[in-house]
Image (tube, rainbow, N blue to C red):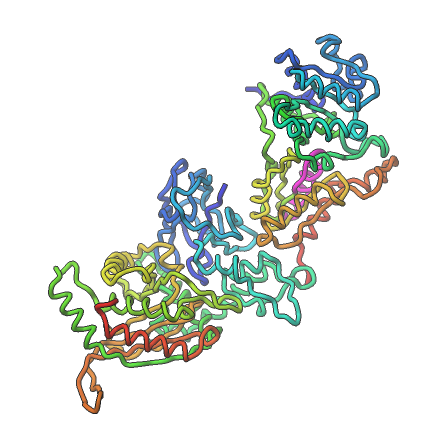
Amino acid sequence: MNDRSLTYREAVREAIREALQRDPRVFLMGEDVGHYGGCFAVTRGLLEEFGPDRIRDTPLAESAFVGAGIGAALGGLRPIVEIMTCNFSLLAADQIMNTAATLLHMSGGQFNVPLVIRMATGGGKQLAAQHSHSLEGWYAHIPGLRILTPATITDARGMLGAALACPDPVLLFENQTLYNMEGTLPDPPPAVDLDSARIMRPGRHLSLLTYGASLWKCLAAAEQLATEGIEAEVVDLRTLRPLDDATLMDSVARTHRVLIVDEGWRSGGISAEISARIMEQRFYDLERPVARLCTAEVPIPYAQHLEEAALPQAGTIAATARTLVSTHD
Amino acid sequence: MIDFTMPSLGADMEAATLMAWKIAPGDTVHRGDVVAEVETDKGLIEIEVFHHGVVEELVAHIGQKLPVGAVLARLRETAPATTTPAPPAALPTTTPPAPVAAAPAPAPPADSPATSAASSTVPPAPAATHTRVSPLARKVAATLGIDLATVTGSGPGGAIERADVERAAAHAAAASASPQAADPASPATATTPAAAPDLSADHPDAATAMRRAIAAAVSKSNREIPHYHLATRIDMTRARAWLEAENARRPITDRLLPAAVLLAAVARALKDHPDLNAAWIGDSLVRRDAVHINFAIATRHGGLISPAVLDVQSKSVDAIMTALNDLIPRAKAGRLRSSELSEGTITVTSLGDLGVETVFGVIYPPQVALIGFGRLSEEPWAENGGLFVRPVIHATLAGDHRATDGRTGARFLESLNRLLQHPESL
């Protein structure tokens, strides 16, 4: 087994290609996924390889093509629908929430919807407010959906196949700052599960619970903190719905101090949910109140320095972590 | 995954050395299984596991000295085979691995002091000024028996955190390791259940360490527990006659010692006076359902160790004798189990075989009472206008005045006396 180097973008593309090769029921559709090769160049070359029946360019009509994806899934196909960024998924929110997520329930268990929707999420690339928000925490509110946030090359490669094997609708949120990230992947790529959080770096002084692009910022912060004698445990949530409570609570029980780092907005976000669960399940193991570091509650600014200031960064993560372990007289 | 951690085998224990593993990765363990041997100030102790599970990994190495709370092994939890008490609600699966400072975070069984404290009797802060205490610090304070009013907080806004509680505990232990407590001839010292290990030649420091352990426990007791002492004389005519008759018709191996009768009487009397079978934790009395009696046993090398005879409330005199026959040789050999050292709910000190007439005991915290028995001797006994010579034993009670009043103690001794007049019903 050899490790090989590739980018997150290539890992996602390989995952799509493998899915198309393995199962004739799988097809991809979305805006500019075919001739243009994808807005983030993820699907470049797939139209030539698989033809227009399986790589389908769609009009700029999210509600229509997500609805078509639901119909195809109900009809026995295994669609991968790409929504350019999660900001535009709101145009299809009715299809996602009122149809995809509810149909199994409303049909009395007769119709499941094996639909996979991929979308880019997150800020940091100066794409301004309408292209930079992080809405995965919103979608994690909805029963009937599974919400995945692949942050590593391994998950970028492995989660799509696992999502297609899932009988119910799955939303994959790919952070757009990660597409150029390079990393290594074992060959053959390992299978991944969709149920567990993963401890990316063990530590005993505090827990950094995070997901997506913030994972790498947390790891950088942990590296900095280690030079100061603070051992931060970094946990990648991987799946926002359902949350892997057991792994999170075990970490809390070991470290007694928690910082949740979340690129969504603070009020009513996934970090609020995790904080509440910790309070419910591990109150008596806490040394300090649970801390959250989220995106500033503003539309993501275009200006680079403002955008940086709005998002959690390694520096602010480390600074917040220090306040959690410091003593005051 | 469960971290199996170094248990606290007494409020004064800080660390122990891993001597042997009784398990290997892949083994299935059940609650109560002996999984390792550790060397403490109290000797070689077999420690038990409090979960059902499969051993994933042995973390600690033989010979390693580990603080209380340090991870020894990791278990993968499996469903309990039988119905056993759930692990403590506040601390279901894990305890911190090797924390910043030595962190006492034992995973005690459901009826041990720490658990009850954590789950039901977190000491309330004074009503007038609400002290800021982290939930973890409260739990640790309850486990260590530290009064939060004595702790200075170093957290935000003066909040008390775990490290503050541990500092206070260490300070208390250090302050108590003073020479005046170390006179082995003093009856007070002799009655402490804080144990004495076998002292072997290759452990030159063992005597000092043992003395320090005793010193810490008795000093904490005398510093924090306002004792009251009650004494009474008990006519043992009937009890002695019953014992003699019983033993006369038994093979030698089944014979009963007076201690078995005394322990049975104590356990029965406690049923009517449950406030004495309890722990004082924080600011409150926590009653124990089970009666685990710490019972002082002399070791081969002249030390004294007080392991607990477990569940005496549900044992017959014969069963108590069986338990003593099992316990005494193991105590002498220094092979006790962790539950026998950590779970006592009351202490009985019997110094009769040393010729002592009356015992004035020092309570073993967080227990709230100690029962003392002197020698059984013939004494003049006035009754109904006549003077007789009777076998008499001096029974005493040392009570924690925070937990109970003299009236409770007096009624207990009265019950004890009454029960010993009907030994056949014990």
Magenta residue check for A202: no
Does residue B404 lie above or below B294 as drawn?
below
Quarter occupied by the C terminus of chain B: bottom left
Give the x, y percent position of residue B216.
Answer: 44, 68
In the picture, measured across the screen, residue B231 lies left or right of residue B375, that is right
Most foreground residue, B145 or B125: B125
Residue B263 location, quadrant: bottom left
Does residue B46 lie above or below B120 as drawn?
above
Q: What stretch is highlighted in magenta?
A: A209-230
Give the x, y percent position of residue A27.
Answer: 70, 14
Q: Is residue A138 among what the camera can see? A: yes
In the picture, measured across the screen, residue B267 lies left or right of residue A246, that is left
Most foreground residue, A170 or A74: A74
Give the x, y percent position of residue B388.
Answer: 17, 86
Does residue B20 lie above or below A130 as drawn?
below
Give the x, y percent position of residue B85.
Answer: 43, 51
Residue A294 location, quadrant: top right
Most foreground residue, A317 or A151: A151
In the picture, measured across the screen, residue A91 lies left or right of residue A235, that is right
User: So how many labels did they put on this image?
Assistant: 0
Most foreground residue, B362 or A299: A299
- Dominant secondary structure (helix, strand or loop) of the stretch shown in magenta: helix
Magenta residue check for A213: yes
Q: Is residue B332 among what the camera can see? A: no
Judged from this view, the residue extending furthest toward the right is A303
Judged from this view, the residue extending furthest toward the bottom is B385
